[in-house]
Amino acid sequence: MREFTLTVILASCLCLPVATFPHLNEKTLQGLIELEQGSNGCPFSDTNINERTKRQVGFDPVTQHVSTTGKHAWLAPNIDAGDKRGPCPGLNALANHGYLPHNGIAPATTIIQGVKDAYGMADDLASFLAIYGTIFDGDSLSLTPGYSIGGPSALGGVLNGTGILKTPSGLTGSHNNYEGDTSSTRGDLYLVGNNDLLQIDNFQQYYDALLDNTPAPKQYSALFPFRQARFNDSLENNPYFFFPQFAGVLVAPAGYAFPPALMSNKSAEYPEGYLDKETFKSFFAVSGEPGSFTYKPGYERIPDNFYKRAIGNEYTIPDFLLNVLEFGLQDPRLLSIGGNTGSPNSFTGVDVANLTGGVYNGASLAQGNNLQCFTFQLIQAEAPGLLTGVYENVTTALKMLGDNIGPSLAGLGCPQLEGVDEALYEGYPGYNKARGV
């Protein structure tokens, strides 16, 4: 695994030709070039990131204002009556404000529109995350495919497809296929007994790590020691710690990247946003003062006078991947598939060549489009196994996944990956436990 992570670092920090990344849009490519030129060859200098965003991002209080009144006035969930809230505070807040159905059972199309309207997430990232959640943790066979943002639900409407073999798990039941260990504010499922409730100690650490009066990109950069500490906590205390490609390497970083990127309040002074601590508490359903915080599950709230990302500066898949790589460059473990093998501090990585039958290896991931190819092809290759026992026939779900991933792979000339050796995961107790083995 070490070989893999080192090549990711080299590919990310060396001056590569634009043709290496034809899937990135012109804005992102130009930004990478400018960042690299201004930061001695590596595109993650705080100064250059923030100087660039000041030049490129404007602020429009009309188009960026997010409504919290009228049909979007905050309304507390009725958990006893079946309203669902789960591990994602951003989605919980959307349900409390009517951007998603108040019961927390939402069609994928509504989730996509909601995160765009309230946060300024781009179509590519919004669509991929919503479709993935629908396929693996919801109901892709319904006339209105979608999922529960919390736990399992037998409610009709969204979750009424024919051919579902069991009640869809929702995000709370998605451990190691969507939700995973090393969360920023939640605990590891097999350490604390749940994965949807905020842990005050984790929140306090995040709160303390947030820089005051600082643009959001620099606030994110300053979270690295906290991110590293949370990884170490799982490594050192959780014998079931497992870090898969999607739930670990790709999704776990969202808990660190999304608040500064999407929950920070935008303004003329801070066009890229500033996540002040009162806003942070509101989005995470926390009140009180440091040292005596109080958490009320499900009460996440979009603050009044909130402004989302500017039109034309939506948060894209490439933006998110840059955030992932920024921390991965500083600690390669954050890019490593693997886990503990039954005791704390026993992390063992998965060899990419063995996993893919030699189609990919550490060296080849640095070539052309192979890194993006590997990520999306791995999701597709593992999908049939993950979906077995969920659907009578996985064809529809796999087609939906392929239709969503296909545009990201079109024209990249990806190597042909026939399958992956999932038996390599069986040495990890956390993988087996999540699958009920």
Image (tube, helix red, strand yellow):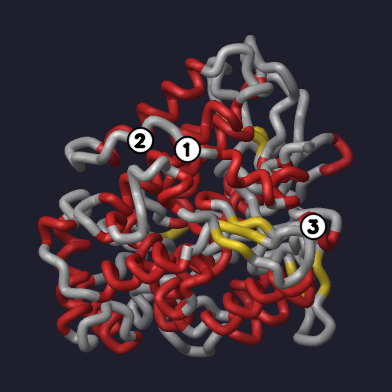
User: Which residue bears the numbered disc 3?
Assistant: 297
**Is residue 303 found left or right of 399 in the rendered image?**
right
Which residue position holds label 2? 417
**Image-quadrant location for residue 284:** bottom right
At label 3, the amino acid type is Pro
Asked whether the viewer can see residue 97, the reply is: no
Q: Where does label 1 land, which residue?
A: 420
Q: Is 409 placed above or below 298 here?
A: above
**Mark 2 belongs to which amino acid?**
Leu
User: Residue 211: percent from the left, percent from the top?
Assistant: 53, 88
Q: Is residue 161 visible?
A: yes
Lateral position of residue 236 relative to residue 396, left or right: right
Callout in the foreground (2, 3):
2
- Which label number is shown at residue 141? none
Q: Are marks 2 and 1 in contact (CB under 8 Å)?
A: yes
Residue 154 vs residue 114, the one in the foreground = 154
Left-right relation of 261 to 241: left
Badge 3 vs badge 1, beta-carbon distance below 8 Å: no
Q: Amino acid at mark 1?
A: Val
SS of the residue at dot 3?
loop
Foreground of the two, 393 or 352: 352
- The residue closer to the viewer here, 375 or 5, is 5
- Is residue 294 positioned above or below 164 on the image? below
**Going 48% across and 49% down the picture, which residue do you hit?**
115
Secondary structure type for disc 2:
loop
Please report whichever mark, 3 or 1, sits nearer to the chain's N-terminal start.
3
- At x 19%, y 86%, the residue is 38
**Secondary structure beneath disc 1?**
loop
Residue drawn 54% across the image and 18% down it: 394
Mark 3, other Cα within 10 Å: few <14 / some 14–19 / many ≥20: some
